[in-house]
Image: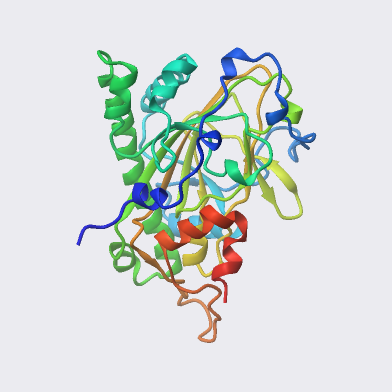
Amino acid sequence: MATSTLEEAYKENPLSLQHILPIDFQSIQEVPNSHLWPKINNVLTSHNDKNPNVPIIDLLAPNVVELMGHACKTWGIFQVVNHGVSLELFDEVEYQARRFFALPAEQKVKVVRSTSGATGYGTARITPFFSKFMWHEGFTVMDSPLDHAKKLWPHDYHKFCDVMENYQKKMKVLSFQLCLFILNYLQPSQDQHSINSFEFAGALQLNSYPCCPNPNHALGLAPHTDSLFLTILHQTNNTKGLQILKKDQGWTSIAPVSNDALIVNVGDLLHILSNGEFPSVYHRVLVDQTKHRVSLAYFFGPQVDSMISPLVSSKDDDGVVLKYRNVKVKEYLGLKAKHLEKVFSMIRF
């Protein structure tokens, strides 16, 4: 039996075009009322711009499983180095992303995401839950962007496709490796068995946060959690915008420790799989008045027909209480598309 895909899951939760099509950021001189948020509290916790103890994990470290498990448990976010992805590839993907976002609005609209689609040009999927729009435009790729790229560059689409496909392959391998480490932490004797019970899927999101005339009253992305197992984010070293909501610290800025460092955060499905042991990170993105930021987010998780059942660690007492019921990925994505952050209360015991 053929498995359903992420694209098919999103077809069942269509959005209206007004919640998909970004405004033409190149044509406006001030923030319109539709994008004007109440003043954003963007005073950073870490005034020296250093990461406030966010774990940095060397994937070649002999105790990498313990380090990663501890990072997932205490922070829900960490940075990885020595991951095997070259700086040259990051530069190539960012170059192609900027090439796309620099196109005129009338070109980009040719590949706008359909109302029931998952790939193409558009706003963040969380847009309908907020009364104001975000200072953001995105382009989502699942596997090959060939059909979209041909519409944009009929005679010069090969490089864009090659780079995006290559990056996704590298991210999928890395994501699988990270999941192996994490499952090994949760169930030390069954890591390979647990991960082999899933078929995985991924999606690459190119994010653009244009220069904003009034960054104190605009948001790149509104506060939210990511839905799948984990997200791998690459953002350039000289710009910062990602913030997480850390208990007792408020909004905390997370900047990469080096140009090739990757930021990894726990998503909702991994939170459920860990029986609530790993927090799904509540995060947002700020914008800048003078810098046009581009980031690359790779979302990774089980195919939508997969059943997510909370794992009980062998390190726990026998009497551990399950916090969440079993839930299929497809059902979870459908519930979140309708209820956003209220979704956990709907599957909690």
Question: Picture coordinates of residue 57 (x, y %)?
Answer: 49, 47
Q: Position of residue 295 (x, y in %)?
A: 50, 30
* Rendered view: 228 above or below 94: below
One can see residue 66 in this view: no
Q: Quadrant of residue 37?
A: top right
Count of numbered marks: 0
Q: Residue at x 34, y 39 (%)?
A: 142
Q: Horizontally, is 155 left or right of 211 in the view?
A: left
Counting from the top left corner in percent of width and height, residue 11 is at 39, 48
| Foreground pick, 123 / 199 | 123
Residue plotted at (27% across, 15% down)? 154
Instruction: Point out the residue furthest to the bottom here.
Output: 319
Q: Quadrant of the C terminus?
A: bottom right
Q: Residue 44: horizontal and vertical position, in percent?
A: 75, 37
At horizontal 54% and vertical 70% (from top left) the residue drawn is 347
Q: Quadrant of the N terminus?
A: bottom left
The one nearer the camera, 17 or 23, is 17
Q: Report the residue that reaches farthest toward the left.
A: 1
Which residue lies at the image location 42% right of the left edge and 17% below the top edge?
Answer: 107
Q: Nearer the viewer, residue 56 or 111?
A: 111
Indicate left or right for 44 with 174 as reference. Answer: right
Residue 26 drawn above or below residue 347:
above
Colour pattern? rainbow
Q: Is residue 216 at least partly visible in the picture?
A: yes
User: Relative to 115, does residue 152 appear above or below in the rendering?
Assistant: above
